[in-house]
Amino acid sequence: MKITVVGTGYVGLVSGACLADVGNDVLCLDVDPAKIRILEDGGIPIHEPGLLEIVRRNVDAGRLFFTTDAEYAARHGTVQFIAVGTPPDEDGSADLKYVLAAARNIGKHMDDYRVVVNKSTVPVGTGDRVREAIVAELAAREAGFPFSVVSNPEFLKEGAAVDDFMRPDRIIVGAGDERAIDLMRELYGPFQRNREKMLVMDVRSAELTKYAANAMLATRISFMNELANLAETLGADIELVRQGIGSDPRIGWHFLYAGCGYGGSCFPKDVKALINTGNERGHDLLILNAVEAANEAQKLRLVDKVVARFGEDLSGRHFGLWGLAFKPNTDDMRDAPSRIIVAELLRRGATVVAYDPVAMDEARRIFGDEPRLAYAERPMEVLEGADALIIVTEWKEFRSPDFIRIKQMLRHAVVFDGRNMYEPSVMARVGLEYYGIGRR
């Protein structure tokens, strides 16, 4: 099948590469020439485990191509995936200018039947707006090519996106005609050989399903963070509470870990967008407003602990920080708790030296030439002369460090753990003063 993917970010590039890997002829379009140059030179513009190998393999096999030519892209694929960004507007709503621009380009240049697939996370009703944009362009050309608009939201976890695409737990398809549904079944056939995973519904329900899924996961995180903060005041241990409620099959284990807040390109943006959608229609989504407020407060929880230990004025204090990305296995720092934590430490007069396996270049771009923020090449280097260690991202390489060496290198044997990576009893045994989130 000939496929065009508009956008080479996390969703577009992963989708295009994986679709090519099962034998399709895939053309990826991006308006950013720098991204296309990186891809044509054998690299990828994002960090995603396993993706580089798939991209190179399919480029070498002649199944995966890249272009900045919108006309060429619109004429290439029978299936046209729109996988561009939907950044939040000032009011929190999703900005659809890139989605609608992609739709207009398809309408302007398509020369046969097309299935236009919204892969981007978009508000309910976007399918109608995409259809209207294409109809307007076809009318301007006095062209009568048929087309279908489909909602096919992605459920890819950054850091595990390739595996999520190749082995999906469900494939949501929102469509209103059998021709498009049949093409989507054919397209996704290789990814559901052992069982039927495709759930077909109307377009608006598919659009809402994506937001509902992310909002539910964000709710679980904020709920556990709220309970963790309460556990500290009650003398309880949130890890034991997690085990107690996670063993209930109605609740389950996923997304029940307390920490210093969620971030990334999905949860913060999608929660805001869903709240905005409710406001536009007169529905005040009370739970999601609380989820967002709790998460913003949680990002300062570690700083509150630092202040309680070292005082309001942190001038002259120096801290080592492990982890900058919002989660492991990515260099994404969009809405990352580290951004709030570092900024607040600097505002209070402290200096910080940080280490992250892949996100330090992104941090340099975000923080610029901040003189009181430095970066280390190795994790243990951040401990030299530091008053305390602050852990923000749960990278694997932080799981089993040399605690005795940490104690020896720090000026004060203090660890603030924003991801509850260590057992308090172990830390006490080696003589480290340990502050987790909701741990006793």
Image: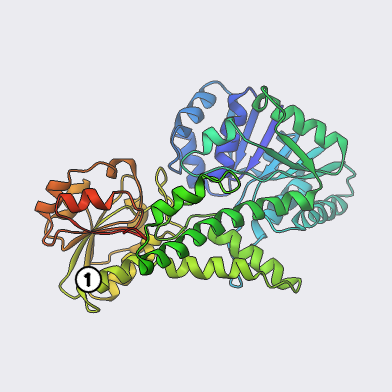
Above or below, 106 against 341 in this view is above
Residue 418 shown left or right of residue 187 in the figure: left
Q: Is residue 111 visible?
A: no
Amino acid of disc 1: Arg
Say which residue appears at 68% left-offset and 73% top-offset.
284
Task: Name the element at disc 1.
Answer: helix
Say which residue appears at 46% left-offset and 68% top-offset.
296
User: Horizontal and vertical percent for residue 179?
Assistant: 86, 34
Judging by the rendered image, the residue that carries numbered circle 1 is: 309
Above or below, 223 against 32 in this view is below
Total numbered labels placed on residues in the image:
1
User: Horizontal and vertical percent for residue 7?
Assistant: 59, 45
Say which residue appears at 48% left-offset and 65% top-offset.
295
Residue 90 shown left or right of residue 331 in the figure: right
Work out whether residue 3 or residue 275 is closer to the camera in this orientation and state it: 275
Above or below, 42 against 300 in this view is above
Residue 192 shown left or right of residue 87 in the figure: right
Work out whether residue 421 or residue 424 is closer to the camera in this orientation and state it: 424
> Mark 1, residues whose alpha carbon is within 10 Å: few (<14), some, or many (≥20)?
few
Q: Residue furthest bottom?
A: 313
Q: Is residue 185 visible?
A: yes
Q: Quadrant of the C terminus?
A: bottom left
